[in-house]
Amino acid sequence: MIKRTIYIIFTILLLFATMPLFGGGQKEAEKGIVKLEFFQNKEEAVGTFDELIARFEERYPNINIEQNNVPEFETVIMTRLATDDLPAIIGMGGTADWGELAKAGYLYDFSNDSSADLVHKGYFAQLKKRTGLEGLYGIPFAVNANTVLYNKAKFRELGLSVPKTWDEFVAAAETCKTAGETPFYLTLKDAWTAMVSFNALAANLQGDDFIEKRRTGDTSFQERYVKVAEKMLTILKYGHDDNFGVGYSDGNMAFANGESVMYIQGVWAIGSILEANPDIELGVFAMPVLNDPDKNRLVSGVDTLFALAKNTEYTEEALLFINFLLEPENAQYYIDQERQFSAVKGVFQEDPVMEGIQVYFETGRVTGFPDHFYLPGMQVPNLVQEFLINGDVDAFLKIMDDEWDKVQQRQ
């Protein structure tokens, strides 16, 4: 934890030393050019946004969009908030941190803006549930899914079919291990990657009333999360020799190169994997958490929304950029490149790789990310990472409850 804290502090100091100095917007008077910072959290989408920004600047040569992507995005944005340096345009998930920015009154309300008419209303309902506010403080853009990616060629070689229950899932991993293959390529050096499994398990096991009852003190992690924790340890057994020494980018490359049979990751990783190995026979399925196939649900939520700093001087120019990204052609380009689903009306994901999870969207067997509703400040990814290192279920769940209570008391 000490090393992690030093890393975060170093990252923040480095950011302040190198970041553009315009924050909410700046105008070069002699050239008549408005500069706006677009601060977004998707490392793998930097190239895609670069292309979209180039298209935008070709249409609007008087507006310069500076994309900014850094490690520890949530930590950095909260630090910048504390120094009154909120970026003009923000691209992030519909997370607890975004919800806190909205509730604190730092974000622009899109309720009366035409941008809201371009997006399916159901995603606004998700965001309103997150904030408890009536205003629209972000425009949903891309929708993701927590999945298990698998190598179809290796499945054929091992005689495996897509598992539909938890027992079948574990049996498939055991078959891989027995055959000398690595079942899951884990990337736990980056703590957030543990949340892919954790969210899939929690969403299907915690009970749909967990967050509400935890807020009122009528339940606890110790009561509801034992199976979640135990199944996380089961998955850990089927990793590789260096589960905590490898991060996300290296994991994408390793899986693309055939170093594991399965890879527990979101659909956002597909683009990077196919870029590394266009010939991989890639498939995707929802993690089967329960032993009743009809009750298993896919975890999906707003992966990227666009928010606008309320005090941005150049609101009109920032809205031009957001509305440009929402144009069907540009929204389609994004989901085609990033292998996600779109919140924009009339934009559809038709990649055959996604065939294995389409049925969940079609039948409504979809649920949200549990960690989007945890209290901000709990640092759950770090807690999960530490738990997987020490393996103590009881201690982990007690810490989760203690951290929830500490944060709740400060509110």
Image (tube, rainbow, N blue to C red):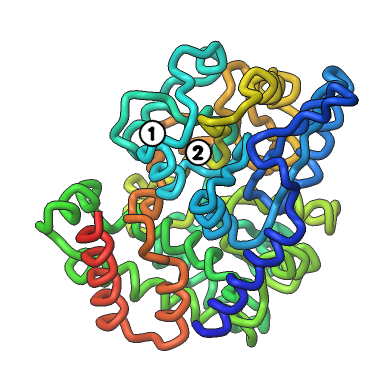
Q: How far across and down, in percent of the image, does residue 121 sit?
A: 43, 20
Numbered mark located on residue 126 in the image: 1
Q: Amino acid at mark 2?
A: Val
Q: Nearer the viewer, residue 233 or 22?
A: 22
Amino acid on which the number 1 mark rests in the picture: Gln
Say if 249 sits above or below 125 in the image: below
> Looking at the picture, how far across and down is residue 193, in whole percent?
55, 64
Vertical arrangement, residue 250 with respect to residue 268, above or below:
below
Q: Do we see residue 74 in this rendering?
A: yes
**Looking at the image, do the residues carrying marks 1 and 2 touch, with CB atoms under 8 Å apart?**
yes
In the drawing, what numbered circle is on residue 302?
A: 2
Residue 162 in view in this figure: no
SS state under label 1: helix
Viewer-side residue, 285 vs 85: 85
The residue depicted at 63 percent of the width and 21 percent of the height is 319
The image shows residue 304, relative to residue 189, as above or below, that is above
* Label 1 Cα crowd, 10 Å radius (few <14 / some 14-19 / many 20+): some
Seen at 70% across and 51% down, the residue is: 69
Q: What is the x, y in percent for residue 135?
A: 37, 24
Estimate how packed mark 2 is, as few (under 14), some (14 to 19) or many (20 or more) residues with alpha carbons within 10 Å: many
Q: Across the whole image, how many numbered discs are drawn on residues?
A: 2
Q: Position of residue 114 (x, y in %)?
A: 55, 11
In 3D space, how far apart are the residues under numbered discs 1 and 2 (Cα atoms)? 8 Å
Nearest to the observer: residue 318 or residue 241? 318
Q: Earlier in the sequence, mark 1 or mark 2?
A: 1
Residue 175 placement, left or right of 49: left
**Horizontal side of residue 82 vs 10, given as left or right:** left
Give me the residue at 53% from left, 60% from top.
Answer: 75
